[in-house]
Amino acid sequence: MAAKLLVEFIGTFLLALVIGMTALDSSLPAGLGPIAVASVLASMIYATSHVSGAHFNPVVTLAFTVRGTTPLRETGPFIAVQLIGAVLASLLSLWAAPPLPDGASIAPLALDVVPTLVFETIFTFAMVFVILNLASARPLKGNQFSGLAVGLVVLAGAYVAGPVSGAAFNPAVTVALGTMGVADWSDVWMHFCGEFAGAMLALAAFTVVDRESTTD
Amino acid sequence: MAAKLLVEFIGTFLLALVIGMTALDSSLPAGLGPIAVASVLASMIYATSHVSGAHFNPVVTLAFTVRGTTPLRETGPFIAVQLIGAVLASLLSLWAAPPLPDGASIAPLALDVVPTLVFETIFTFAMVFVILNLASARPLKGNQFSGLAVGLVVLAGAYVAGPVSGAAFNPAVTVALGTMGVADWSDVWMHFCGEFAGAMLALAAFTVVDRESTTD
Amino acid sequence: MAAKLLVEFIGTFLLALVIGMTALDSSLPAGLGPIAVASVLASMIYATSHVSGAHFNPVVTLAFTVRGTTPLRETGPFIAVQLIGAVLASLLSLWAAPPLPDGASIAPLALDVVPTLVFETIFTFAMVFVILNLASARPLKGNQFSGLAVGLVVLAGAYVAGPVSGAAFNPAVTVALGTMGVADWSDVWMHFCGEFAGAMLALAAFTVVDRESTTD
Amino acid sequence: MAAKLLVEFIGTFLLALVIGMTALDSSLPAGLGPIAVASVLASMIYATSHVSGAHFNPVVTLAFTVRGTTPLRETGPFIAVQLIGAVLASLLSLWAAPPLPDGASIAPLALDVVPTLVFETIFTFAMVFVILNLASARPLKGNQFSGLAVGLVVLAGAYVAGPVSGAAFNPAVTVALGTMGVADWSDVWMHFCGEFAGAMLALAAFTVVDRESTTD
């Protein structure tokens, strides 16, 4: 299990570092942050999914636990290293990011409850639905496009949900945003609820689709 | 068939939601909307084409019906859930998109008849020709690049046809643009005609190419 | 052969249309044109290389003719339909592109002889070297990444050679640029020389590499 | 071995040329340089990894030497042609890049020691860890995504480490940056140390992960 935990740590750390640096670096042209985030995610999925499944996300680990793909004794350690990786990456980002112009400080996202819940739910749903199909649908066994497909749905989600909810889709990322002051700690429950709901809805939809399409 | 209808609904809903939010959100840097749209389309094709064929587009469903790939009894339900998904996504986009600066309201696209017809026809042709080859050409059976190839032709088409025709290539998307006020209802017939013509031309070209290249 | 000529026509027409529209449309954010061009090229390669080899480029056809992959009786017709497709797409672009602001007219590229020759040669070399390896190297037989790899080298070449030489890498594209007034007819010989030299150098390098690496 | 050295030269030359031209060309919209760099790298990996392994990077060659994949007698020649290719490409970039506006001259990167070391280490680690998994992990044998996965991790690294360390991740690139005056010669030791450390850490992490995951 050490190998699995190591790659989950590496992957989540790098994901959160790219999110942190692009969120804090005001010199990056607008709109390129999501490209960097989707790129590192896709690359790490390609490099490591044969080891740990490349979750990098507590609600993905939960969904695979409910499905029985991830054994229960791995669930806690997976989530723990994901959170540790994300927090360390946030601290590194805070230390390394160039200062904001004019000594400005980071303004946390102003999040409205209902839109935040709706968009975190919808795009976490989309991402987890993609992940479950690519990882578990029998006709897609051995496919070569899981990194690409997951990266692309996150890219689209980041552009669309970004201005509404902050586009985390991942409790470890939400904790990173809180640690950096990009999200207010009093708001992170909206993310957690949407992320959990989205993942469970995706699991339900996948279960229906998978049963039907393999018995057809 | 429930599984197929569910994924057609999910895919078209997400496609139209990304189109809607990027069309209505004036804070997104120019030119990034098409990247988000192509990304979500490619990702959903990868995740679901083993279930329903991943049409997400009434004229694609029509083309597969004429070819005999989609049985006639599925054609109507497919198109119905695609339209329902697109309309629901438009309503959600209208509700969630940040307000335009200075209280401006959405100006519908100013479309000229002939250029709109020509560009919707050409790029719907290009997209459906790509889809038909990837899905049905025998030498490409089992290929792993259909999501990518369809996403890329839509991306190019969105940049090129966007300023001319609005770049829908899909009657469900056209209905979404109408619902959001991005296209004028009195103009949508141009889209529908171009989309239908493009799809049928693609079917004709594919039929010629496929017969010749497999009998060579 | 009709199927091959039809897809060569379609592919080169769409490639030149995307180049033409993005070159003439001043409303497209700078830097996005090459993304559209690389995207349509990659997509058409994926969709049609099983039919014609997806050349869309007279010097690629020449290189495959010298190698013996393309039979001599196909060389002339391939190049003819590529040129016809490119010219028709240029005329369509001139007709459809939105007028320049303030009634300005298109200024042809100001090309210096030596840099133009050098950069057209280098990046045509790079592109044709990639194409030859992907299409003909035995260890890469049946690979699924040829569209992507060719699109990406063209994308890089467009960014780098664009400001120096106009980044055609393709005599059919050069003819399209001439037809639209984007390149001066008195300058196109530089493109042709660089494109021909680049393709022949790529053929030489590939021949050396391929012989050595398969006899190792 | 001549074939291997030729493709290592071609690949590193093109990589450094794209880096050089996009670093020196102030007309390229901000943020597009990394896309061009990642694209040419991915494309050349796809086209040539069956010949030489497509290192294009002295620390990658070192890592494969330590692993035993690259025989010791090839290590020196590989690194030599990589450096020669990078220097020639820098000189060509200096000659061909459009002059800076107002006769300005190139300002070398202002690098702080610790952040530069940290970010060169982290992203060289990430890149080499991806490369080692894709090239050597048994479950990934024959995969079709190595070009894409390496290109994407470099793209993310370029956006994130660019403003901090200059984002070389490659001693040949560092030498190119020095030759062009983009990096100060007195600073390149920071790059070299970070690149070497990152590659060796990646080798260590890969060795642990690979042993564990194949004995599970």
Image (spheres, coloured by chain):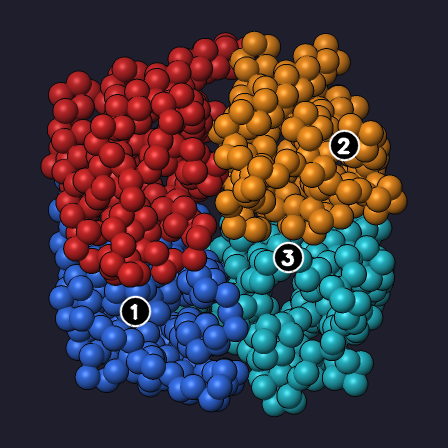
Chain colours: A blue, B red, C orange, D cyan
Local SS, label 2: loop
Query: To which quarter of the image does residue C87 belong?
Result: top right
Q: Which residue is mark 1?
A: A166
The x and y percentages for residue C209 are: 78, 43
Determine the residue positioned at 69% across, 18% down: C79
Indicate which label's residue lies in the foreground, 1 or 3: 3
Q: Quadrant of the C terminus of chain D?
A: bottom left
Residue neighbourhood size for the residue with mark 2, other residues' Cα within 10 Å, grouped as few (<14), some (14–19), many (≥20): some
C13 versus D211 height, above or below: above
In this rendering, the answer to whether A184 lies above or below C108 is below
Q: Position of residue B133 (x, y in %)?
A: 43, 25
Q: Report the amino acid beneath label 2.
A: Asp
Q: Can marks 1 and 2 be said to lie on one chain?
A: no
Q: Position of residue C199 (x, y in %)?
A: 78, 34
Q: Residue at x 29, y 61 (%)?
A: B102
Could you give the CA–CA distance between mark 3 and mark 2, rounded to whole angstroms?
A: 23 Å
Q: Which is nearer the eye, B205 or B16?
A: B16
Most extreme residue toward the right is: C114
**Secondary structure category for the residue under label 1:** loop
Q: Chain of mark 3?
A: D
Horizontally, residue B84 falls left or right of residue A11, namely: left
- Residue D204 appears anywhere in the view: no
Q: Are marks 1 and 3 in contact (CB under 8 Å)?
A: no
Q: Which residue is mark 2?
A: C184
Which residue lies under the disc numbered 3?
D28
